[in-house]
Image (cartoon, grey):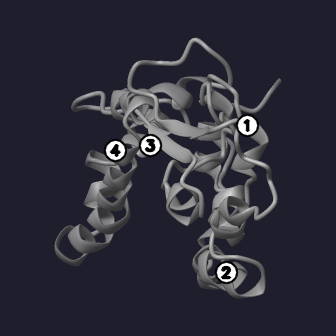
Amino acid sequence: MAQKRFHRHFETPGLPLYWIIIAYIILGWFFPVIGLLAIICMIGPVVTSIFKGRWWCGHVCPRGNMYDRLLSKYSPHRPIPKFVRTFGFRLFMVFFIFTMFVTLSFIYAPRTWCSFCPMGTISNWVAPKKAPLPKAFTNIHVSSACQMKCKQCARVCPMQLTPYDSRGEAVGYLHPDCLKCGKCTLACPTKIMTLKH
């Protein structure tokens, strides 16, 4: 006879907040500045923990809400490995993740982390890669007059991309890792690159 699992799904009281993640991804696709709201989910739990413990994680965190309301229904509910709760492992994860942001900047380039960041990777996957483009879509347009001699646009690109590859293309530069920061347009000595909305 199979042993019955101790842990199980239990309906979570309160509001279903996991829709915030879905809305965040969809709206972020059209309005990338919305990504700045992630700062709230980084600072919120730490600040509220000073007064309420990990209350944020159980009542406000959209990801935690998704785990409790959706994934919990399908999870095998096996015991969480003890080592992931140890101080050493937690310190390693905090150190590893935060140092990745900074250390890679000094070893390679400032935006190295952004090249494989989980949310950046998903954004890369869902970003439009061909026409027709959403109305709110912003991208770089390079004139056919570009001769690719100076490559200043590639030199200043934080993601080390090559916008000049799209010279003369009506749809513009559609590399899914392009941040639309406009540095390439400012660096172009002949000013034949534009950031169009």
Of the residues under marks 4 and 2, which one precedes in the sequence?
A: 4
Q: How many marks?
A: 4
Tags 3 and 1 touching, CB below 8 Å: no
SS of the residue under disc 3: helix
**Residue holding disc 1:** 166
SS of the residue under disc 4: helix
Three-letter code for the amino acid on which mark 1 is drawn: Ser
Three-letter code for the amino acid on which mark 2 is drawn: Ser
Tags 4 and 1 touching, CB below 8 Å: no
Residue occupying the point 73% across, 55% down: 161
Of the residues under marks 3 and 1, which one precedes in the sequence?
A: 3
**Residue holding disc 2:** 105
Crowding at label 4, few (<14), some or many (≥20) Cα neighbours within 10 Å?
few
Residue 73 picture location, percent across and down: 54, 24
Crowding at label 2, few (<14), some or many (≥20) Cα neighbours within 10 Å?
some
Residue occupying the point 53% across, 55% down: 185
Of the residues under marks 4 and 1, which one precedes in the sequence?
A: 4
Of residues 8 and 192, the one drawn nearer to the viewer in this rendering: 192
In this view, the mark in front (3 or 1): 1
Of residues 107 and 180, the one drawn nearer to the viewer in this rendering: 180
In this view, the mark in front (4 or 3): 4
Of the residues under marks 4 and 3, which one precedes in the sequence?
A: 4
Q: CA distance from mark 3 to mark 1?
A: 38 Å
Name of the residue lying farthest toward the top: 132
Three-letter code for the amino acid on which mark 4 is drawn: Ile
Residue occupying the point 70% across, 57% down: 115
Identify the disc placed on residue 63.
3
Q: Quadrant of residue 55?
A: bottom left
SS of the residue under disc 2: helix
Identify the disc placed on residue 34.
4
**Is 145 rendered above or below residue 92?**
above
Q: CA distance from mark 4 to mark 1?
A: 27 Å
